[in-house]
Amino acid sequence: MHSCRPEVVDDNPAALDVLWRALEPEPFGPAVRIRAVMISSVDGTTAVDGLSGPLGTPTDRLVYDAMRARADVVLVGSGTALDEGYGPATVAPVWTDRRDRAEPPPVIVLTRNLDDALLDHCAKIGSGMQIAAAAETPPARIAAARSAGVCVHVMGKGPFAQSLRDLLAELGAGEVTFEGGPRLLADFVTQGLVDELVLTVSPEIIVGGRSPGLVPSHTLHRVPMRVAAAFSCPRGGLYTRWVVDHGGRNEPAGGTVSDRTYGTDGVDGADE
Ligand SMILES: NC(=O)c1ccc[n+]([C@@H]2O[C@H](COP(=O)([O-])OP(=O)(O)OC[C@H]3O[C@@H](n4cnc5c(N)ncnc54)[C@H](OP(=O)(O)O)[C@@H]3O)[C@@H](O)[C@H]2O)c1
């Protein structure tokens, strides 16, 4: 009988294959593919007591680890790196055989200010954690980080999206996992920096709380997407992979799947 429930994925070997395949990007698309990995509750809450971990499930952990195992670079914002106590990326044993390189991806932390807390944190971690500083980052902060042994990449002066894609291309990154927080995700989405969204919907509704939604912003910006994969888990969470329609760039030759063209409507404090 036909079921409306998405396939349930556990951590047995056959299910791991299903999960890995669900996260496989299509063969077409940009050379540098930025794939945001996020978790929210059904209502869109992204953190409990300032952390995303309490929303997780064992299957979410598998998805998160799989995305790191696929990645050439892990990108994150400085707030997330510090709040969540980021260390160097490791490749989880369950995915090691599928990764096609021995070394884990570097974690690259985005910053404009490069303040002491971030500098000290990265210096303590070592080469597994690098910094991508905005063009406007004070040169003295960049010099201080470099003399503390931190690898600092400085982005170009042009538009942020282009500068970041140029940096990632220079680093030879094909699959980039973006683990930044919701405010940074909103900036990324608005600036066309997200090619795919791997979204875990945690099986709960959280009423109240002060966490931002998935993409908080004062400006309305609508982005067409299509679902590329969806599955569930024994605990009832939902795991989805969405591909952003950048006007054809992420679509097979022959046209887009959507004829909608959404953009910025510039609505302040939108309350649709
Ligand atoms: N639910 C989830 O999946 C999830 C995922 C990740 C994080 N979180 C939670 O989200 C919270 C933090 O999120 P957030 O939205 O504030 O994002 P974030 O990941 O902390 O990124 C924000 C930071 O990125 C840097 N940045 C912003 N724009 C930049 C640019 N154009 N160039 C270079 N650097 C730039 C700034 O760093 P400087 O201040 O250093 O200049 C900014 O403070 C944490 O509580 C975390 O636990 C939830």
Image (cartoon, rainbow, N blue to C red):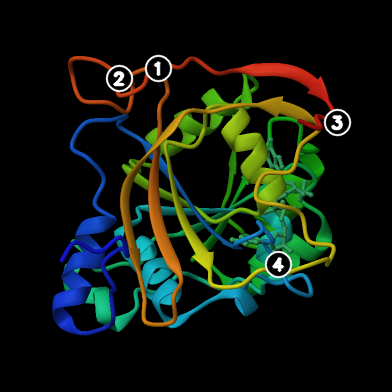
Q: Is mark 2 within 8 Å of ligand 1?
A: no
| Residue corresponding to mark 2 | 256
Sequence-wise first label, 4 or 1: 4
Q: Residue 148's spot in the image, x, y percent?
A: 69, 62
* 250 is higher (above) or lower (below) than 185: above
Give the residue type at disc 3.
Answer: Gly
Q: Look at mark 1 in the image and give the residue it sits on.
A: 247
Report the residue marked by disc 4: 47
Dot 4 falls on a residue whose secondary structure is loop
- Label 2 neighbour load within 10 Å: few <14, some 14-19, many 20+: some
Task: Return the disc, 3 or 1, that comes first in the chain's sequence.
Answer: 1
Distance, label 3 to label 1, CA atoms, is: 26 Å
Dot 3 crowding, Cα within 10 Å, few <14, some 14–19, many 20+: few
**Residue 25 falls in which quadrant of the image?**
top left
Numbered disc 3: secondary structure: loop
* Spatial CA span between label 2 and label 4: 34 Å
Indicate which disc residue 269 carries.
3
Judge whether 76 appears above or below 202 on screen. Answer: above
Q: Compared to 3, does 112 lie above or below?
A: above
